[in-house]
Image (cartoon, rainbow, N blue to C red):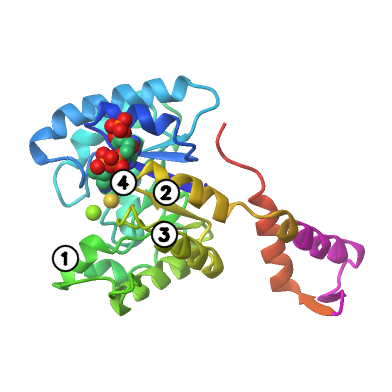
């Protein structure tokens, strides 16, 4: 999944636009972009939209961002959207594997009540939105088979830390948020799931956005969240492995296949060992797009 576009659940116009945005996934938002007094109608709108979106072919992967476990709103969110069978929920303000275990139990009950197979609805946590979450970012491994990735957030974290800014004047994340970003990457790798980069809120700054996509790809993220449709094609372009990278990866895989048992091979005067093989295999896997 390269691009995941946030869409406020209480905006029919944006929901409609999102479908043709080209995003691999849509995140129908019941949390921060929906005011408290609009939560109830937003739930109904989200459920209606999810049902409709799932019927389309081809269709994007559909997630619903519910409200965090500490808000007291999560149960009503799940009651409303589970019958619509979203592919996944996004769990904001997650605090390590225990949050996922908690969400897993809530989902299991509702799946049973709605005659859905156990484990049908997956979970994508936002792993770095609270101070506590940073200290448990390495605990997602094995929490639940529902876990499909990890992502991170800087906005709520900066509010919690009491910071005046989370980026420098050039638009680069400051140290506490670079730490959160790195913990997301390491936490995802430890849990053997993809890491998805956070949002870039300055949606008119195309150059800054592209740079952040390229930095994320370089560091190991496999996709990025978007808040505006204009960001989607840039994400898709940057995170689609190009022909040259695919050919190099295939050459590494082929060289190891020809030399079973070899720990290291040479191709074109360059050494490749097992970590290179693992990276090549992962890159080739990304050639297959999840949207169906
Ligand atoms: N999904 C789908 N469509 C969107 C969209 C989104 N996230 N963001 C904007 N659009 C649509 C607008 O409705 C508009 O369509 P229209 O001209 O047919 O009405 C078009 O794209 C251009 O939008 P633009 O005028 O450039 O921006 P805006 O001022 O309407 O919206 C935001 C700006 C930030 C309010 C909007 O992008 C948004 O709501 N983003 C998502 C916010 C969110 O979910 N945040 C939570 C996660 S951090
Ligand atoms: Mg938030």
Q: Does the magenta segment cover residue 250?
A: yes
Q: How far apart are the two marked residues, 2 and 3, measured between alpha carbons? A: 8 Å
User: Badge 3: how crowded within 10 Å, few (<14), some, or many (20+)?
Assistant: many
- Work out how far the residue at label 2 is from the one at label 4, CA to CA, in angstroms: 30 Å
Q: Provide the residue span drawn in magenta.
A: 247-269
> Residue 79: percent from the left, percent from the top?
24, 30
Where does label 1 land, which residue? 159
Task: Mark 1 and mark 3 in contact? Answer it, CB < 8 Å.
Answer: no
Q: Say which quarter of the image contains residue 174.
A: bottom left
Mark 2 crowd level (few <14, some 14–19, many ≥20, 10 Å Cα): many
Residue 65 seen by the camera: no
Q: Which residue is mark 2?
A: 231
Which part of the image, by quadrant, shows the C terminus? Answer: top right
Q: Quadrant of ligand 1?
A: top left
Badges 2 and 3: C-beta atoms under 8 Å apart? yes
Q: Which residue in the structure is indicated by mark 4? A: 103
Q: In 3D space, how far apart are the residues under numbered discs 4 and 1 (Cα atoms)?
A: 24 Å
């Amino acid at each position: 999944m390269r691009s995941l576009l946030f869409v406020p659940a209480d905006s029919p116009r944006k929901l409609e636009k999102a479908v043709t945005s080209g995003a691999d996934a849509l995140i129908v938002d019941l949390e921060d972009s929906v005011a408290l007094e609009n939560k109830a109608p937003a739930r109904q709108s989200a459920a209606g939209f999810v049902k409709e979106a799932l019927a389309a072919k081809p269709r994007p992967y559909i997630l619903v961002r519910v409200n965090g476990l500490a808000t007291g709103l999560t149960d009503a969110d799940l009651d409303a959207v589970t019958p619509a069978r979203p592919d996944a929920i996004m769990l904001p303000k997650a605090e390590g594997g225990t949050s996922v275990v908690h969400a897993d139990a809530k989902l299991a009950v509702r799946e049973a009540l709605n005659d859905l197979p156990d484990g049908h609805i997956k979970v994508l946590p936002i792993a770095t939105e609270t101070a506590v979450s940073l200290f448990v970012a390495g605990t997602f491994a094995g929490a639940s088979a529902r876990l499909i990735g990890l992502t991170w957030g800087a906005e709520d974290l900066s509010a919690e830390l009491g910071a005046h800014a989370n980026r420098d004047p050039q638009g680069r994340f400051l140290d506490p948020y670079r730490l959160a970003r790195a913990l997301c990457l390491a936490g995802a790798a430890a849990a053997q799931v993809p890491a998805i980069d956070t949002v870039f809120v300055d949606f008119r700054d195309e150059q800054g956005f592209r740079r952040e996509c390229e930095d994320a790809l370089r560091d190991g993220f496999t996709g990025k969240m978007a808040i505006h449709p204009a960001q989607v094609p840039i994400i898709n372009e940057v995170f689609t492995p190009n022909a040259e990278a695919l050919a190099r990866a295939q050459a590494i895989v082929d060289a190891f296949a020809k030399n079973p048992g070899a720990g290291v091979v040479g191709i074109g005067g360059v050494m490749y060992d097992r970590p290179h093989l693992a990276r090549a295999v992962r890159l080739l896997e990304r050639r297959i797009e999840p949207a169906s």
